[in-house]
Amino acid sequence: MFKKLIFLLFLLGIAAAGYAYYTVMVAPVVPDGEPIVVTIPTGANYEQVMDSLAAHGVSPNRAIFDPLAERMAWKRDPMRSGRYQLTAGDSYTDLIRKLRSGSRETVKVILTVEREPENVAAKAARFLEGDSLDFVRVLQDEAYIESIGYTKETLQTLFIPNTYDMYWDATPKGFVERMIKEHDRYWNKERRDKAKAQGLSPAEVYTLASIVHSESLARKEQPRIAGLYLNRLKQGIMLQSDPTAVFATRAFGITRVLNEHIQTQHPYNTYTNYGLPPGPIAMPEISAIEAVLNPEEHDYVYMCAKGDNSGLHNFAKTLAGHGRNIAVYVANLKARGLR
């Protein structure tokens, strides 16, 4: 009888070990369905992570899971932060390996035509863990800005509009460091040589591109506009760009630039100052940057909107020709009942 009891206990031990092995190595802990993305904030402790897993329907047997998490060196304080994708059928060990390995999910950080660094900060915070104020503080820290080779006026030239795959828990300075790498990658030798051929630095190209972009979203005429402004720079003519007057007066959203805007004394107003403004007036599209690097060669120094709701412009080489284009603009506005 005693031997039978021992044998029975032996079988039970084997069964328990088998169950434990099955639970840990085979039995799914992640429920069926679409992949689950779990977000672990920076500084989270083990219990907070377990709560986050449970909120996504992942509820392992803690009597088995907790010791396993310790043996597999995942449980620590604080836990590894990030976004992790779990798939249906993941076992206990699959789950821990994914959360422990650092094979984190990335997020797409989309930078488009943000006006100023503060707008870049707000956009980055939409995709990344940090609060927008954390990003703003970094982008307004003049000592830090100087340490990376910029000023508050030129900082916007760091950001190249694009979509970037980044880890969700990237810090504000980590974000800036990534932008520096992307900036340097974009400004390769070929582009730097083209900028030099125009007598401009990369930052000046970016600044002029911000004006070109603000003048016209029509990519087909951006090289012509870039050529016009380069002609003005080389001939010592004021750029007299309406968008710079708008930026200087912060009159964003107006439908027509008036004398009160163009007469405002401000470093960014190219109606009252020669040359380029101290920095960009927006983040330009890549097409505008490329337009400045590859401008159309011509003798135009004047431009005027057509006024026909096309968003396009007429160009002139002389003041007389510009006067005729203004007449066309006024006539088109009248035909549309706008004047």
Image (cartoon, grey):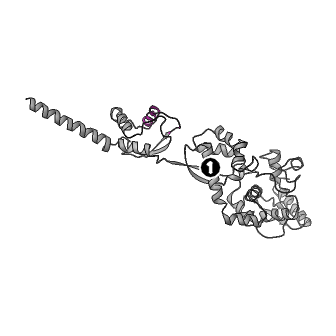
Q: Which residues are magenta?
A: 40-57
Neighbours of disc 1 within 10 Å: few (<14), some (14-19), many (20+): few
Residue matched to label 1: 177
Q: Position of residue 164 (x, y in %)?
A: 58, 52
What kind of residue is marked 1? Glu
**Quadrant hosting residue 47:** top left
How many numbered circles are shown?
1
Q: Residue at x 66, y 44 (%)?
A: 121
Q: Is residue 219 above or below residue 163?
A: below
Q: Is residue 194 magenta?
A: no
Q: Is residue 233 left or right of residue 280?
A: right
Q: Is residue 65 above or below residue 221?
A: above
Q: Is residue 53 magenta?
A: yes
Q: Position of residue 287 (x, y in %)?
A: 69, 61
Q: Is residue 290 left or right of residue 52?
A: right
**Quadrant hosting residue 187:** bottom right
Q: Position of residue 243 (x, y in %)?
A: 80, 52
Q: Position of residue 190 (x, y in %)?
A: 68, 66
Placement of the N terminus among the 4 image quadrants:
top left
